[in-house]
Image (cartoon, rainbow, N blue to C red):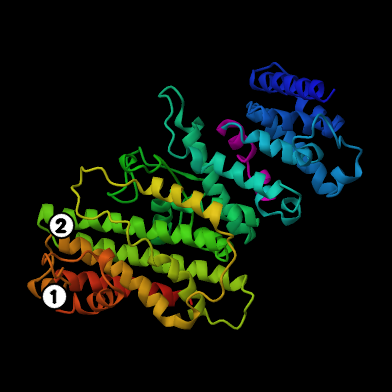
Amino acid sequence: MIEVQNATATGLARLLAAASRAPDRLPADFAEKLVTTDPGAAGVLFTYGDLARVPFGGRFLHRAATVLTATERKDPNCWETRSLTTAFGDGPDSTGLRDPVRGLLRAAENSPESAQAVLGDSDLPKYFLTDQESAARPGRGRAVAELLTEATVNHARDTHPATTPKEQSIPWNAAKISSLAIHTTADAGKIIPEARLPLAQIFSMYLPDIEKSYRIGTAPENVDVQDHTGKRGYPNPYVTVKEGWPRYGALVRRGDSRRALNAIGSDGASRKLIGRTVMAYSAYRMDQAALEDKTNGTKDRLPSVAADSAYLTGAMISDLADGDISDAKNLDETREKKQAKVASVFLTPLDFTVVGKALDAPYPIITDFFLSEAKNLAAGDSGKPNEQIAIDRSNDGMDAAKDRLTLQAFESARIHGHLSPTDREQWPQDPKTGAPVPVNEMTETQRGNLASDVGSEIGTYAEKVRQGVETKFRANVISYR
């Protein structure tokens, strides 16, 4: 009997999914009638469709989600008080059967089209991403988080046929929903805990666009996607599709970036992901700039890019620290201590070396790097804030993050021949080979000495780099205290 029920439910789910994808195969109000008349049966079909990994039509699921959430908002206990299906087949997912919204969220994750349809308006994302009571239902928060990732990061770098209008393409909608997720979180000042890491992934995937929001501060109203294939191209010359960045970018305002980072600042995994991505991104850009100076005989690109990287790093540390303060259990901690704790994750990765390669050489793709990091953090990091990290070195934490950025810039300057004779003499040498020691192989003492000694000679290339980093990093952090 159980096998018959399983087979029947799977078959019906497949039929419904196929019909929902075909134009005009179902009456226009079929989704509304299904979830209104028997939400329990709808939950069964959504759940078995998810288990069979069959995609449902996006418009169909959006209509069903709209009706189900409207019912749920009127009566938060509606699924518990109604006589719904509590047992069916071998009970592969009793939570999904009991909660039709959760079953729908899981089914929507089966394709980017359906995921984007459900999260593509302004109302449903607000409810799913910020309503704590909704997310508290068993399995609901995780389902929302996985749906957000499928709708955005998983397909941000997709291509699309030339015959598909870009505004209707999957990567365009990924950028649009990413912008919407940041704005929704910023507007509400919160996001459900399970979705914090997916939002951090969005920040990392669209980091060049986030950087632009920090530099410019504003964005056009009613515009939520940046077309990097157009005349304006990417926000900076070192970011292209070749390096793995999305061709369509998120468009957000500075205030939205800041408030959204506030909302995820207390999550340890999110801090780590953003910190590692920002430092890898900065190292990549600075090396490109140093090589450009060498190729063109100029002396201004690396100092300028290093200053921009310092501004971005300082601002993101400050904004993440603000969020950590708002969620802090220990309210006696000073802001400097909070900044130091956040800054500690911006010290990595020392072994992410992208310097010393030709402009046309294959670089490690930053986006692949952070996607791998995100999986590791999701699997092995609880995301709970550690209140003791770097507290006993509060002032040293910010200095260490700034020095790490400076050392990355010095490394690029050394490899591409920009250091003065005095600065070259300050660089640690391998006692056996006499070769310069890479920064990631130095002792902490050697790094500390290098950070304080190189660039101390007025008027040198390294001194310009140091001054740019110092001014932009410290001035930015102080301005947000």
Q: Quadrant of the N terminus?
A: top right
Q: Is residue 300 visible?
A: no
Is 343 situated above or below 183? below
Is 188 situated above or below 16? below
Is 205 situated above or below 68? below
Quickly name the residue at label 1: 459
Q: The residue under label 1 is which amino acid type?
A: Gly
What residue appears at the point 50 percent right and 67 percent down from the top-left corner? 319
Any magenta on residue 114? yes
Is 403 situated above or below 117? below
Part of the protein shown in magenta: 112-127
What label sits on residue 287 in the rendered view?
none
Q: The residue under label 2 is which amino acid type?
A: Asp
- Element under label 2? helix
Q: Nearer the viewer, residue 76 or 225?
A: 76
Quickly name the residue at label 2: 293
What residue appears at the point 53 percent right and 59 percent down from the top-left corner? 269
Q: Nearer the viewer, residue 435 or 347?
A: 435
Question: Residue 472 at x, y = what percent?
Answer: 33, 71
Left/right of residue 254 with respect to residue 109 in the rendered view: left
Left/right of residue 457 with respect to residue 344 in the rendered view: left
What residue appears at the point 50 percent right and 45 percent down from the top-left corner? 224
